[in-house]
Image (cartoon, grey):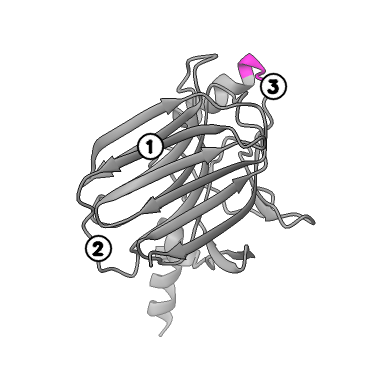
Amino acid sequence: MKWLIAVAVGLGLLFPAVSDARKVRTLRWSGDTWTLRHTYGASNPGRNIFSDSPKSVWVDSKQRLNLRIRNGRAVEIIGKRRFYGTFTWSIGSNLAYLDSWRVIGLFVWLPNGNEQDVEFARWGVPNSPTGWTVGWFYHTRANFTNFPVTPYAPYTVKMTWSPTDVHYVMTDAHGASLIDVIYTHPMPYADSIFGFQPRMSHWLWPGVKGSRLSRSRKLHTNSVLRINSFSYSPLR
């Protein structure tokens, strides 16, 4: 028995993951339970380290979800499995004046390499349009559109995913249409417990280097992303 204990202690010292059986953190928001992502090392997207700290992800007194890049660490939350339908977000933060190195992702993910994204990023190019819609088909980027975003929050983002196409719509607080585009191609269903997962992320490009660039250039954008709500309705 003593040698078993010694081996266990040794493994814990050599491999922290063995001894650190950390509990997966979840939170309640918009009537659902969400899982918070945590990584010990750099991972995709963008070779970021993801934090599930309460100082990085929390729900405030107005029931808004807050995703904060803190100490160079990205954040991502993962929703439960859905199916074909309409995924809707209300974004409370002003997205027109993003730091050149921050990326905001609202996306729906399937494990077979199919993913549909609405992203807000400049990819290091100051004053460029921040909006992107991107469709992935078996790990290959099949479609994308770049569009400008007005400074009038809150914004409503809708993504309707059907077996034949994906329809993206985004409007600002004044009702102006910022994007209305349909990508038409087959959308194979993935029968998996991870199918059609809605996810929200706030990360840096390119990874930790992006964090250094943001600090050194003293860009003025607040690092907190506020999402007012999320909802889902299945196809009829």
Q: Which residues are magenta?
A: 216-220
Q: Nearer the viewer, residue 169 or 73?
A: 169
- Give the amino acid type for the residue marked by disc 3 in the picture: His
Vertical comparison of 28 with 97: above or below:
below
Vertical comparison of 196 with 73: above or below:
below
Residue hosting label 2: 190
The location of residue 35, given as percent across then percent down, is 52, 62
Q: CA distance from mark 3 to mark 1?
A: 31 Å
Q: Is residue 99 visible?
A: yes
Residue hosting label 3: 220
Q: CA distance from mark 1 to mark 2?
A: 24 Å
Q: Is residue 185 left or right of residue 133?
A: left
Answer yes or no: do the residues labelled 1 and 2 have beta carbons within 8 Å? no
Q: Secondary structure at mark 3?
A: loop
Q: CA distance from mark 3 to mark 2?
A: 41 Å
The location of residue 118, given as percent across then percent down, is 44, 40
Q: Nearer the viewer, mark 3 or mark 2?
A: 2
Q: Residues within 10 Å of mark 3 (few under 14, many from 20)?
A: few
Q: Is residue 205 magenta?
A: no
Q: Is residue 18 left or right of residue 97?
A: left
Vertical comparison of 97 with 91: above or below:
above
Labels 3 and 1: the sequence-earlier one? 1
Q: Residues within 10 Å of mark 2 (few under 14, many from 20)?
A: some
Q: Which residue shows up at 40% across the image and 36% down it?
A: 133
Q: Indicate which disc residue 181 carries.
A: 1
Labels 1 and 2: the sequence-earlier one? 1
Which quadrant holds the C terminus?
bottom left
Q: Secondary structure at mark 1?
A: strand
Q: Main secondary structure of the magenta part?
A: loop
Q: Which residue shows up at 51% across the image and 26% down it?
A: 130
Labels 3 and 2: the sequence-earlier one? 2
- Give the amino acid type for the residue marked by disc 1 in the picture: Val
